[in-house]
Image (cartoon, rainbow, N blue to C red):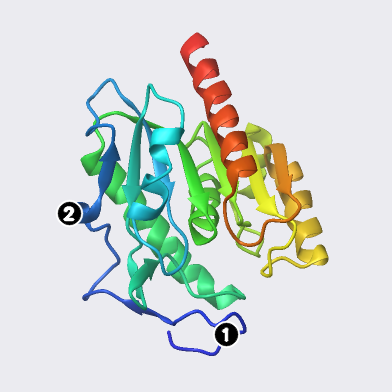
Amino acid sequence: MSRPNPFGFPPVERIGEGPARIDESAVRFFPHAPGPQDRVVLLLHGLGSNEQDLLSLAPMLPGGVVYAALRGVLACGPGFGWLAPPPLGADDLGLLEESAAALEDWASRAVPGRIVGAIGFSQGAVLSLQLLRRDAEALDWVVVLSGAPFPADLPGDAALAEQGVPALWGHGGQDPLFDPTMEAQVRDWLRRHTRLTEELSPSLGHGIDEQILDAVAAFVRARLAEGTSS
């Protein structure tokens, strides 16, 4: 899995032998571990990071749910990841599918409550969308931060488009991973496959700022209110 990449990310490497698995000892919950009645929101970090990254945002997000921060299933330098470094090609789909299957397996065994949404950054955003492309009913909503769908047509895309899952796409106007062409392609895909809300922070690079965080909090609050009233 070592290969040159134009953005300077370390290569990803498998952890252990056999299929990828979520490290349950590394899962972190806020404000507490979920019970059977809890609604759970996944926090999925980007390449080279770890479970503590997005967990640090949880205190600034709406309450009434349990936030579950997971560690990527691949090693990447001192951190972790979910698939190969960008730019992605068709041969990288296998790693993404393996990561999605590992998350689904963990959720089926370890989450007593109901997973209602996912907030993913960069690679975590790719994975969040992949969960929906595998099962359009897997999540009630998704937050895609500085991320994009995997660049291929997949069997579940038509079902996802029909489902109309609410999605927030938060991204920066100065993100070096997104040129204008790619930004337009991502916007078009999300409009065709989700019920899209877009939040663009013009001066932001590949990251999360106060504007994006405020948009995430408002979006999650609205989605949770919808879930409570339904």
Residue lying at 35% horizontally and 70% vertically, measured from the top left = 79
**Local crowd size for mark 1, using a 10 Å CA cut-off: few (<14), some (14–19), many (≥20):** some
Across and down, in percent, residue 37 comes to 28, 20
Residue lying at 38% horizontally and 46% vertically, measured from the top left = 56
Across and down, in percent, residue 1 comes to 43, 84
Q: Tell me the element at label 1.
A: loop
Q: Which residue corresponds to mark 2?
A: 25
Return the disc, 1 or 2, that comes first in the chain's sequence. Answer: 1
Above or below: residue 189 compared with residue 197: below
Q: Amino acid at mark 2?
A: Ser
Labelled disc at residue 5: 1
Q: Tell me the element at label 2.
A: helix
Q: Amino acid at mark 1?
A: Asn
Whether residue 215 sits left or right of residue 43 in the image: it is right
In this orientation, does residue 159 appear?
no
Question: Image quadrant of residue 148?
Answer: bottom right
For the residues bearing labels 1 and 2, Cβ distance under 8 angstroms: no
